[in-house]
């Protein structure tokens, strides 16, 4: 039994999917762990820092495609292009606004860990996510204003402070462990991976808080919102993966990075004034983040001869 539990803990995509399912099946539990969202983010950011290969990160950072082009495409060009496309076809309303808002968010900080689960290095996701995250206090309000969103009431200074505290604390912990306990870090890599997966599981479960109640109140709207969130994630992932050079692992990592967004940052910045429909979309946006890794792994599994 213990061996099976350890194997399950190492099976990241399955655990993440179970987190979403558990949050939907056990609403009181999802509500109970909701206050742990920030702590979970800290854990998997710090864990990702610890497990990244420094040489791979430096190589990715020196490549303008990862350090400039992809972050710019992620948080500026993509949301503006979607906003212009929606306006061109006459698609307006809260769902369109929520989609643009979600795309103004930086890539999810879980992308590097998820990429590692799928056999990639995680360095590309880390570089693109970090650059985009530090730029989003300036880019997100700009995108909101240029796209004509009614939700352009972000506070760049508050968002920047929260990002600085989170990334600074995670980075400080990582540097301290690498400096004072390098052997411990080197010998316990698999343990850090399991801790990250556990944090992702709790995070996935917590983001489902309130979703079942919304579903029973208006199932058609919730299903439509989830469908749009899935479509946006998958289309972005496929477009950028197919358009990118490199190995299959690198292209998969780029696709994940461009599709999975950290909408929690925008959610926190909007605070209590967030439109309820936008909040619903942000919750729906968690479904593809924590279930598509399992689908990707199944699609990449070799077919029996």
Image (cartoon, grey):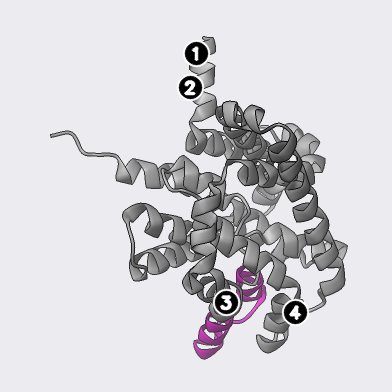
Q: Residues within 10 Å of mark 1 (few under 14, many from 20)?
A: few
Q: CA distance from mark 1 to mark 4?
A: 49 Å
The residue under label 4 is 141
The residue under label 2 is 7
Q: Nearer the viewer, mark 4 or mark 3?
A: 3
Query: What residue lies at 35% left-to-right and 41% top-to-bottom?
Result: 298
Where are the magenta residues, as a range? 79-103
Spot occupied by residue 108 in the image (x, y as percentages of width and height): 61, 56
- Tell me which secondary structure the magenta stretch mostly adopts: helix
In front of the other: 102 or 140: 140
The residue under label 3 is 72
Q: Quadrant of residue 149?
A: bottom right
The residue under label 1 is 3
Query: What residue lies at 75% left-to-right and 81% top-to-bottom?
Result: 150
Indicate left or right for 209 with 126 as reference: right
Membership of 36 in magenta stretch: no
Spot occupied by residue 131 in the image (x, y as percentages of width and height): 63, 67
Give yes or no for contact between labels 3 and 1 (Cβ–Cβ under 8 Å): no
Circle 1 SS class = helix
Which label's residue is closer to the chain start, 2 or 4? 2
In front of the other: 120 or 280: 120
**Relative to 24, does residue 271 appear above or below in the rendering?**
below
């Amino acid at each position: 039994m213990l061996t099976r539990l350890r194997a399950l803990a190492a099976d990241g995509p399955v655990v993440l999917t179970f987190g979403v399912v558990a949050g939907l099946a056990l609403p009181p539990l999802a509500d109970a762990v909701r206050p742990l969202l920030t702590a979970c983010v800290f854990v998997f950011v710090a864990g990702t820092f610890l497990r990244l290969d420094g040489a791979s990160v430096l190589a990715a950072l020196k490549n303008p495609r990862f350090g400039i082009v992809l972050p710019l495409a992620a948080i500026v060009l993509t949301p503006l292009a979607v906003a212009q496309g929606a306006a061109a076809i006459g698609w307006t309303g809260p769902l369109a606004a929520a989609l643009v808002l979600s795309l103004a968010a930086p890539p999810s900080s879980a992308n590097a860990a998820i990429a590692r689960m799928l056999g990639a290095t995680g360095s590309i996701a880390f570089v693109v996510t970090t650059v985009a995250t530090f730029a989003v206090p300036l880019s997100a309000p700009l995108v909101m204003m240029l796209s004509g969103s009614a939700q352009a009431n972000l506070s760049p200074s508050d968002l920047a402070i929260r990002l600085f505290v989170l990334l600074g604390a995670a980075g400080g912990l990582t540097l301290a462990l690498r400096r004072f306990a390098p052997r411990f870090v080197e010998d316990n890599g698999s343990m850090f991976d399991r801790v990250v997966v556990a944090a992702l599981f709790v995070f996935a479960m917590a983001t489902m808080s309130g979703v079942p109640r919304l579903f029973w109140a208006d199932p058609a709207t919730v299903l439509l919102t989830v469908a749009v969130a899935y479509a946006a994630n998958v289309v972005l992932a496929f477009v950028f993966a197919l358009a990118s050079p490199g190995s299959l692992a690198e292209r998969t990592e780029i696709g994940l990075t461009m599709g999975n967004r950290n909408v929690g940052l925008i959610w926190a910045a909007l605070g209590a004034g967030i439109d309820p429909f936008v909040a619903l979309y942000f919750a729906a946006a968690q479904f593809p983040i924590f279930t598509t890794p399992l689908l990707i792994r199944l699609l990449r599994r070799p077919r029996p001869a």
